[in-house]
């Protein structure tokens, strides 16, 4: 052993390979492989081994082993005067870094007051002045930056940036509410089918996307930062509203988390889109990447609808083309009948009688569309006849112009004809109204079975 200083290694009885430099350094030591440099460094260490303490009161009350403390009162390790401190594998660098540690293990603190309040937390890493200074029992946390901090017992979370703060377990925060942009060439989210379970393709789609309320907004960044810091006077003393002017001037496009939460609940959708507050001091958030799958599903649904509409349009175009052909055939048929009528003198009863009346005799005559149309067995044809006329017929033909029925009608004004087509095949047929040999109109009716 090597001792240099009043009281250094004063009560050491069995410890070996120790080096003590300074007043009361390792004064009570019986451990081995310890190095203490500084007044009262490792003063109360009695059995701990493999420790290194450099600085006034560094590792003052340590009974553990494999700890390294560099800085005045680093790993001071005194809780209510208790000297039963058994931390293992801790590293503290900075004034009062890991000050209250007892018996937290494998923590690393680098900076003034870093991990200051930690007592039982393990495997924490803090870099920066007052980094993770509020954590006392949380473990597996990382804090990098001035006052980058978490709540007392938060577990497995990360805060990076000056005044970066989170209140929830298993959460990572980069920057504070004054951070304007987060830049990077590419961001990759773990997505490996080998490590996914309960895969289900039933996810919200078009119905969900249509129900969202997109808005534009600006953050009240200064108010948010005060909320995250829980209005701690000490921490608020180092920020001012002007620090957040640029962040508050930005106009953002997105959604309101509470709106999305309400929509998810109302429709019974499942998902991790909404980050709910873990505590009263926490805030809402949205995982915008979670919206990608519903948007893709909505596009797929729209594509299916579009394909169906295209097929419907194609079918309708074919029907229209057929109707155009039939209309052309009907026009040709009517023209042929008119030519025959002009040549016929006198005509037999099966043909239309040529009249010598003035053309005004058919004024007021009209032909209506049959109802219902299409029809299955029977349908009704409505018509109007003029005040004066000699004869009138309704002629029904097939698409080839063949006359299927010729019915005489009488009486002026409105009338109707019931047609029973139970013996006809499905398809399109045509009917015409002729008054005193003049064609008043032609319409199509469709028999569907």
Image (cartoon, helix red, strand yellow):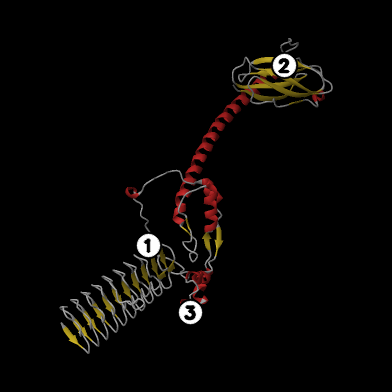
Labels 2 and 3: the sequence-earlier one: 3
Q: Which residue is mark 2?
A: 341
How far apart are the two marked residues, 2 and 3, measured between alpha carbons? 107 Å
- Measuring from the top left, give residue 230's x and y in whole percent: 49, 71
Above or below 26: residue 293: above
Labels 3 and 1: the sequence-earlier one: 1
Q: Is residue 50 left or right of residue 424?
A: left
Task: Find residue 365 and name its label.
Answer: none
How far apart are the two marked residues, 2 and 1, measured between alpha carbons? 85 Å
Q: Contact, CB < 8 Å: mark 2 with mark 1? A: no
**Residue plotted at (63% across, 19% down):** 398
Along the viewing direction, whichever of 322 and 51 lies nearer the viewer: 51
Q: Which residue is mark 1?
A: 185
Residue 343 placement: quadrant: top right
Residue 44 placement: quadrant: bottom left
- Residue 310 appears in the rendering: yes
Tell me the quarter of the image containing the C terminus.
Answer: top right
- Measuring from the top left, give residue 373's x and y in whole percent: 66, 26
User: Mark 3: few, some, or many residues within 10 Å (few <14, many ≥20)?
Assistant: few
Above or below 369: residue 120: below
- Measuring from the top left, give residue 322's x and y in whole percent: 57, 27
Q: Which residue is mark 3?
A: 237
Mark closer to the observer (2, 1): 1
Q: Is residue 440 left or right of residue 34?
A: right
Labels 2 and 1: the sequence-earlier one: 1
- Measuring from the top left, give residue 173's x and y in whole percent: 41, 65
**Residue plotted at (28% across, 71% down):** 87
């Amino acid at each position: 052993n090597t001792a240099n200083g009043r009281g250094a290694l004063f009560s050491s009885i069995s410890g070996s390979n120790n080096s003590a430099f300074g007043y009361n350094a390792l004064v009570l030591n019986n451990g081995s492989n310890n190095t203490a440099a500084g007044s009262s460094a490792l003063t109360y260490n009695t059995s701990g081994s493999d420790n290194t303490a450099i600085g006034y009161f560094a590792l003052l009350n340590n009974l553990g082993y494999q700890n390294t403390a560099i800085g005045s009162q680093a790993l001071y390790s005194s809780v209510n005067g208790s000297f039963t401190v058994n931390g293992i594998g801790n590293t503290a660098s900075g004034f009062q870094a890991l000050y209250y540690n007892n018996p937290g293990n494998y923590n690393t603190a680098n900076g003034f007051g870093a991990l200051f309040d930690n007592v039982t937390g393990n495997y924490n890493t803090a870099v920066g002045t007052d980094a993770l200074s509020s954590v006392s029992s949380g473990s597996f946390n990382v804090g990098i930056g001035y006052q980058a901090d978490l709540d007392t017992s938060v577990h497995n979370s990360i805060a990076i940036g000056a005044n970066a703060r989170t209140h929830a377990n298993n959460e990572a925060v980069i920057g504070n509410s004054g951070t304007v942009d987060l830049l990077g060439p590419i961001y990759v989210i773990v997505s490996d089918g080998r490590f996914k379970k309960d895969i289900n393709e039933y996810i919200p789609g078009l119905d969900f996307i249509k129900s969202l309320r997109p808005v534009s907004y600006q953050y009240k960044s200064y108010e948010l930062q005060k909320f995250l810091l829980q209005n701690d006077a000490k921490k608020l003393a180092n920020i001012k509203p002007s620090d957040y002017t640029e962040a508050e001037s930005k106009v953002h496009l997105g959604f309101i988390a509470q709106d999305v939460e309400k929509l998810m609940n109302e429709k019974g959708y499942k998902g991790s889109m909404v980050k709910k507050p873990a505590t009263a001091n926490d805030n809402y958030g949205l995982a915008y990447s979670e919206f990608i799958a519903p948007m893709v599903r909505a596009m797929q649904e729209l594509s299916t609808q579009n394909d169906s509409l295209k097929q419907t349009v194609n079918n309708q175009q074919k029907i229209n083309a057929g109707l155009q052909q039939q209309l052309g055939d009907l026009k040709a048929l009517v023209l042929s009948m008119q030519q025959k009528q002009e040549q016929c003198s006198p005509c037999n009863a099966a043909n239309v009688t040529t009249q010598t009346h003035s053309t005004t005799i058919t004024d007021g005559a009209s032909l209506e569309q049959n109802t219902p149309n299409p029809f299955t067995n029977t349908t009704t044809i409505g018509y109007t006849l003029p005040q004066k006329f000699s004869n009138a017929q309704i002629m029904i033909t097939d698409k080839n112009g063949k006359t299927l029925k010729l019915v005489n009608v009488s009486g002026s004004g409105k009338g109707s004809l019931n047609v029973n087509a139970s013996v006809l095949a499905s398809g399109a047929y045509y009917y015409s109204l002729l008054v005193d040999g003049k064609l008043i109109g032609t319409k199509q009716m469709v028999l569907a079975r």
